[in-house]
Image: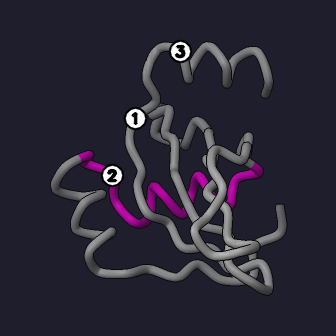
């Protein structure tokens, strides 16, 4: 997936940091590292579905970032966290 821009909204940035301990830099590393991407839900706006991006980043963490794909290859991250055991297994099999 080609990304032209990442749109950050303050409420999601705070959630990443305070609830999940994921920094913007870590989330962007996932998104820009050729991650394993899959669609997880239809969006409430036509053409703006929710996707997940799974990747192991340079510090060794296995992260999953959920985002909305906007028009013109822009994305809006809405959450990010460490992968759970089943997600790591899926990532290992499909990467």
Position of the C terminus by quadrant: top right
Rendering coords of residue 2 (x, y %): 83, 69
Name the N-terminal-most of marks 1 and 2. Answer: 2
Residue under label 3, please give it. Answer: 86
Q: How far apart are marks 3 and 1 (CA)?
A: 12 Å
Q: Residue at x 45, y 55 (%)?
A: 26
Up-down relation of residue 47 to residue 7 (above or below): above
As for residue 25 lying within the magenta part, the answer is yes
Q: Say which of 31 and 84 sits in front.
A: 84
Q: How far apart are marks 1 and 2 (CA)?
A: 8 Å
Query: Which residue occupies 40% across, 35% down?
Result: 82
Q: Say few, some or many: other residues with alpha carbon within 10 Å of mark 1 (under 14 / 14 to 19 / 20 or more).
A: some
In whole angstroms, how far apart are the C-alphas of marks 2 and 3? 20 Å
In what element is the residue under mark 3?
Answer: helix
Question: Where does label 2 land, which residue?
Answer: 22
Nearest to the observer: residue 4 or residue 29:
4
Q: Give the range drawn in magenta.
A: 20-34
**Main structural element of the magenta stretch: helix, strand or loop?**
helix
Q: In which quarter of the image is residue 58?
A: top right
SS type, badge 1: strand
Residue 7 point in image, percent of width and height: 52, 82
- Looking at the image, residue 88 sits to the left or right of residue 74; the answer is left
Q: In this view, does 73 lie above or below 12?
A: below
Horizontal side, residue 19 vs residue 44: left or right: left
Picture coordinates of residue 63, whole percent (x, y): 49, 39
Q: Which residue is under mark 1? A: 82
Q: Are marks 1 and 2 in contact (CB under 8 Å)?
A: yes
Tell me where residue 30 appears, x and y as whole percent. Answer: 59, 52
Residue appearing at x 44%, y 80% in the figure: 8
Quadrant position of the N terminus in the picture: bottom right
């Amino acid at each position: 997936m080609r990304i032209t821009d990442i749109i950050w909204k303050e409420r999601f940035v705070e959630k990443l940091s305070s609830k999940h301990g994921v920094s913007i830099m870590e989330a962007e590393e996932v998104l820009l590292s050729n991650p394993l991407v899959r669609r997880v839900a239809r969006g409430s706006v036509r053409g703006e579905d929710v996707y997940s991006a799974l990747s192991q980043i340079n510090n060794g963490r296995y992260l999953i970032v959920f985002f909305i794909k906007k028009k013109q290859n822009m994305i809006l991250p809405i959450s990010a966290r460490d992968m759970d055991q089943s997600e790591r297994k899926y990532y290992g099999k499909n990467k």
